[in-house]
Image (spheres, grey):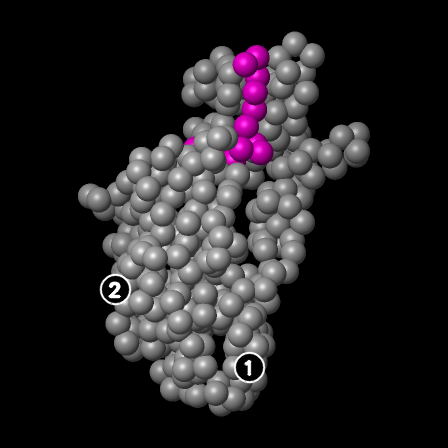
Amino acid sequence: MGLLSIDSQLDFKTFQRLKINGELLEGVDIISYCQKQKFEIFNEIAIFMKDWLNNDPEIEVQTSGSTGRPQKMKVLKSQMLQSAAATALFFDFKTNENIYLSLSIRFIAGKMMIVRALYSQMNLIVLQEQNNRPIEVFPDDLEIHFAAFVPLQLKGAIASQKIKTILLGGASISTQQEEYFQSLTANIYHSYGMTETLSHVAIRKVNGLDRTNIFTALPGVQFELDDRNCLIIDVPFLPQKVITNDIVELIDSNHFLWKGRFDNIINSGGIKIFPEELEIKIQPLLNCNYFFIGLEDEILGEKVCLFIESLEYSDIQLSTFKSEISQILSKYEMPKEIYFKKNFSYTLSSKIKRKDTVIQYFEEK
């Protein structure tokens, strides 16, 4: 099935050698090495490798909570290797290239960085605890061939010339961020995926002459739509198709344009509005977190509302802000209400929990 079928029986027991910071280790020596290091991230690696090296063909992973309550699920280690194989094929990984770990291993994105190093026999670079400016801690003589970050970690990055390829995931990229990325020398990509698909299944180029808004499937992956126009993902190494709540414009079975979340759509007076599109439009006006959401309205069914993570604006500030967004949004997109909340509710992976935030806001009133 697809380009990956020839590797469908990958045996995890043959992938027990890991090079960390230039030191080639095998089996329990990986665990011993990590336990001697001072940063907590090494302890996380040791815990993961204990699970990887045992005889159980499955390993436990945790969803982030972006689509509901965070939960644990079992996946086959051979499936994780298949996912690593797809990424290696797409980016043309080479043995001994440097792959940088800057993501928490509690979630699938961090775990998969280790599996990619195992599969492609790459050198896993681990420098320190995760932080919001990981590139700035790179030694001057260090060259990274592949690194994965959340978009926030690239904010203000000035050392991207040390990295050949950067993969961004875990959050959307604003227009302002994307324009900033044009000044960086690394090849920057945006990924689409989730725990259920064992990390990314589609990628788009963010900077350079070949930048695009269209996501391209990894080798072997195919897409289709359900009757909601939501994406269905057919991954060759998974036993069944993954049905998502992501509304897309399907270009063909290997390409799509992401529109927004089905569960976030606002139906206001019969007009369907995608909150994510509005959030991108007004991004230059706000330096804090915010989101659009539909709240019940007797006349419209749902009215467009904007929540901002901030102390309440003064009357003058609010009037100025409304004037500014009216120059960007259409009359149908303009928020009927603007609410301010000091602290939003977040998932473990730092995604905004929209509905919980709204419930908390009105409970506090």
How far apart are the two marked residues, 2 and 1, measured between alpha carbons? Answer: 30 Å
In the visual, does 21 lie left or right of 307?
A: left
Look at the picture and state if 164 lies above or below 117: above
Along the line of sight, which residue is nearer the eye, 98 or 338?
A: 98
Q: Secondary structure at mark 2?
A: loop
Q: Mark 2, residues whose alpha carbon is within 10 Å: few (<14), some, or many (≥20)? A: few
Could you tell me residue 249's position as x and y percent?
38, 32
**Residue identifier under label 2:** 92
- Report the disc number at residue 298: none
Give the residue at x 37% y 63%.
Answer: 147
Residue 336 appears in which quarter of the rendering?
Answer: top right
Give the residue at x 79% y 34%.
Answer: 364
Give the residue at x 53% y 74%.
Answer: 57
Type of the residue with mark 1: Asn
**Residue identifier under label 1:** 55
Residue 36 visible in this rendered orientation of the protein: yes
Q: Residue furthest top?
A: 299
Q: Quadrant of the N terminus?
A: bottom left
Could you tell me residue 254's position as x and y percent?
31, 44
Q: Quadrant of the C terminus?
A: top right
- 2 or 1: tag closer to the N-terminus: 1
Give the residue at x 61% y 25%.
Answer: 294
- Name the mark nearer the viewer: 2 or 1: 1
Look at the picture and state if 17 lies above or below 232: below
Q: In the rendered picture of this protein, how many numbered marks are placed on residues?
A: 2
Stretch in magenta: 259-270
Type of the residue with mark 2: Asp
- The answer to whether marks 2 and 1 mark residues whose Cβ atoms lie closer than 8 Å is no
Could you tell me residue 159's position as x and y percent?
33, 60
